[in-house]
Amino acid sequence: MTDLWTSTLLELIHRSSCDLPADIESELRRRQELEPAGSQARATLATMLENASLARSRQAPICQDTGTLTFYWHVPAGADVLPRLSQARVAVAEATRRGWLRRNTIDSLSGRSIDSNVAEGSPVFHVEQEARTDTLVWLLQKGGGCENMSRQYSLPDARLNAGRDLAGVRACVLDAAWQAQGHGCAPGVLGVCIGADRAEGYAAAKRQLLRPLADVAPEPELAALESRLLVDANELGIGPMGLSGRTTLLGVKLTARPRVPASFFVTVAYMCWACRRRGVRAQTADGRVVEWHG
Amino acid sequence: MTTELIHPFTEAQVRPLAIGAAVTLTGMLYTGRDRLHKFLYEGGVPPVELRDGAIYHCGPVVVQDDGGAWRVVAAGPTTSIREEPYMAGIIERYGVRVVIGKGGMGPATREACRRCGCVYLQVVGGAAVSLARCIEQVRAVHFLDEFGATEAMWTLAVRGFEAVVAIDTHGRSLYDEVATASRRELERLLAR
C-alpha cells in the first residue's frame, strides 16, 4: 500500500463499509423515538443503532453483505483514469483481506467464490469527465437482500390502475414498498427514476441513493411527491424488518429522465437501512484527500 | 419476558413459543445459505447432526489469523425466502428444530414448522456486528472449498443470541399478519 491514491481508496471503502452515514443514523434515532415504548419496532431500531456504533468502534462491516461495490468517478476532462481504476481494484482486494469486505463475489457459471472480489465487472465503475481539476469519487455498497427488492414498472399498469402521470408513479412506488415488506431490511431508502429506458432507469434510480436524506429534488413537483410518498409509505405499517411499526422508509429520492414516446418506466431501487455511501474529493495527481462526503 | 433456548433444541422447548416472543439461543448454530440448502434438499449428507439443531441463514465475514484460526467479524442474517423451495423438506428430513434468518418464509415452511415442531426466528438484518459479538467460537467449517467462505457451513458456538419468534409451531406467522394489514393500508392509500 505504497501509493497515496490506493490508500485514499482503501480508506473510502473502510469508511463506507464500517461507518454508517450520519444522516442515516440520526434519522434512525429520530424514528426510534416515534415508535411506542416496548414495541418490536423500537427494539429493532435500537439494535440497528447499537450495531452501527459497534461497527464504527470495532472497524467491522455494518452488515456482512458488503454488497455490490459501485464507484462513481468524476474526473477532470483529459485525465487518465485507468491507473485510478487499477488502484481501486487493489484497494478492494486489500479491504477484503482486512475483513472490511466479505468474500462476496461469485463466478456465475462455475459457482466458485472469487475471493479477492476483483474480476471483470467487479467492482463496478461509472466514469464521468467534467470541467474540474480535482477528482471526486463516490462508493455505494448495496447488498443483495435489498437489490432483490428493486423493481421496474411499465406504465400503464392495469393491476395498479396506474396511468402515465405522477399519480401512476406514486402507485408504483407504494406498491414497491409494499412488495418489499421486510425483505429488503426496512426501513429502506428508495431511489426512483421516472422515464429513461430499462437499463438507464435502474442506473439513475440507484444513483439517487447517493443523495443525502435532507436533499430535495430540484423540480417542485418531484420534491412534493418525495415528501408525500415518505409520509404515505410510513402509513403502510410494515415497520423495521417487516415486523410492523411506523418506520418503513427513511427517504424517497426521485429523478426524471427523458423517454421515448412508447415507453414509460418507473424504476425503484430499494436500499436497506444500512445505506452505505461515501465520497471523497482528492487531488487528481496524487490522491491527497481534500474532503470527505457523506 | 425472554425465553432462553439451549442446544440441543427440543420439541418441548419450542412448542410453547408464540409469534412475537423474544428468545435467546445458547449452543451451536450451523450457517447455511443457498448452496447448502440445495445440497441438503437433493439428498446430500449433512456433516453435522441437524436433529434438534438450528440452521442460521447467514454468510459471515470471516478472517483467518496467522495460526489458521477463524474469527467471525460480521454475521447478520440473509434473506430467508430464497430457501423456501427447500426449507420444508429439510426440516422434515433432518429434524431441524430452529431456523434463523430475516424477512420470513412462505406457507410451505410455516406448515412444516407446525407439523414437525420447528420455529422460525428473526434476527435484525444488517445487525452484523451486534450478532457476531454473541459468537464465542468458530467450532468447525464444512464445504469451505466447494461453496466458498460465504456459503460454507460454519459451526458457531453462541451465547445469548437474541431473536424474535416470527413463525411458531401453531401455524402463525408475524409476516402474514403484517402483509395483510399493510395490504389494507396500501389499498386505502391508492384510493386517495
Image (cartoon, rainbow, N blue to C red):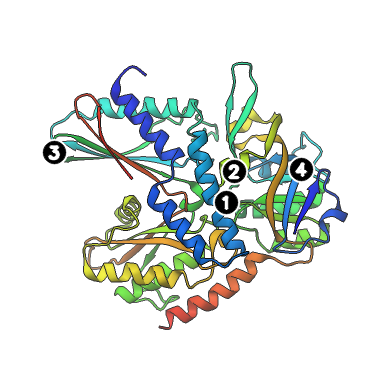
Pick the residue in front: B172 or A157. Answer: B172
Element on which disc 3 rests: loop
Give x and y (percent) for residue A156. 35, 74
Q: CA distance from mark 1 to mark 3?
A: 42 Å
Judge depth for marks 4 and 1 and give the one in front.
1
Q: Is residue A236 above or below residue A147?
A: below
- Mark 4 lies on residue: B26
Residue B59 figure quarter: top right
Amino acid identity at mark 2 = Ser
Name the amino acid, label 3. Answer: Arg
Quick check: B137 left or right of A28?
right
* Chain holding disc 4: B
Q: Is residue B69 above or below residue B154?
A: above
Report the amino acid beneath label 4: Thr
From the image, state whether disc 4 or disc 3 is nearer to you.
Answer: 4
Judged left or right of residue B170, residue A24 is left
The crowd level at tag 3 (other Cα within 10 Å; few <14, some 14-19, many 20+) is few
Query: Along the polypeptide, which appears first: circle 4 or circle 2?
Result: 4
Residue occupying the point 75% across, 66% down: B171
The N terminus of chain A is located in which quarter? top left
- Marker disc for residue B130: 2
Q: Identify the secondary structure beneath mark 1.
A: helix
Residue on which disc 3 sits:
A132
Q: Residue at x 49, y 79 (%)?
A: B187
- Position of residue A100 relative to residue A221, above or below, is above
